[in-house]
Image: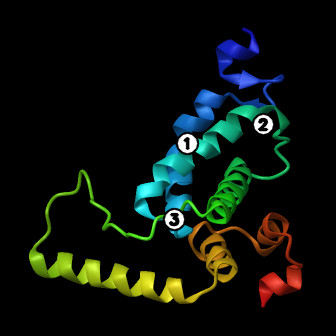
Amino acid sequence: MDASSSGLDRGALSPGFETVYREHHAFVWRSIRRLGVPDADVDDLVQEVFVVVHRRLGEFEARSAITTWLFGIAYRVMQEHRRRGDARVRREQQVEVGRPPTEPDRRLSRVEAVGVLDELLERLDEDQRSVFVMAEVVKLSAPEIAELTGAKLNTVYS
């Protein structure tokens, strides 16, 4: 059996692109969304992430979890997106697909809670928000966050 038929590249050191895409697309999408990218831009940035993944997958050395590597790419793509100024001003509420409808009071409470969380996150500057998402949502360790952001480890801990 050769590497291409098993879905693995380079002697089974790194997974094939199709496997990475299939197993981690939802993770990348959630990560991009939680980094504060407007809903209207999320799919485009996820696509950009996987273009980079496709191009650089052979460079993945498995020194860290693949999700850490993917999040690092997603983080850099998001930063470049903001630098380019492509982020749209308008915000749209996320439509929940595939969930059964909830009674109006519960739905309103959830919408209000998400709104409050979004408002609190918007008060953080871009770096603080990104580190918060990395630590509390993606559950990266402080050393992983320091490596991704280029910050000193003690700064991440503070």
Q: Is mark 1 on a helix, strand or loop?
A: helix
Query: Which of label 2 and label 1 is nearer to you?
Result: 1
Q: Which residue is drawn at 66% across and 13% down?
A: 5
Q: For the C terminus, which image quadrant?
A: bottom right
Q: Residues within 10 Å of mark 2 (few under 14, many from 20)?
A: few
Judge whether 48 appears above or below 119 on screen.
Answer: above
Question: The disc labelled 2 sits on which kind of residue?
Answer: Arg
Query: Which of label 2 and label 3 is nearer to you?
Result: 3
Query: Disc 2 to disc 3, how far (Cα)?
Result: 23 Å
For label 2, the residue is 56
Tag shown at residue 37: 3
Q: Is there CB contact under 8 Å for labels 2 and 1?
A: no
Q: Nearer the viewer, residue 115 or 16?
A: 115
Question: The disc labelled 1 sits on which kind of residue?
Answer: Gln
Q: Which residue is drawn at 14% across and 62% down?
A: 101
Q: Residues within 10 Å of mark 3 (few under 14, many from 20)?
A: many
Residue 152, x across and y down, in percent: 89, 79
Question: The disc labelled 3 sits on which kind of residue?
Answer: Val
Judge whether 12 appears above or below 62 on screen.
Answer: above
Residue 28, x across and y down, in percent: 56, 52
Query: How many numbered circles are shown?
Result: 3
Q: Is mark 3 on a helix, strand or loop?
A: loop
Kindly give the residue lying farthest to the left in the view shown: 103
Q: Which of the two discs, 3 and 1, labels the residue nearer the N terminus?
A: 3
Query: Disc 3 to disc 1, how far (Cα)?
Result: 14 Å
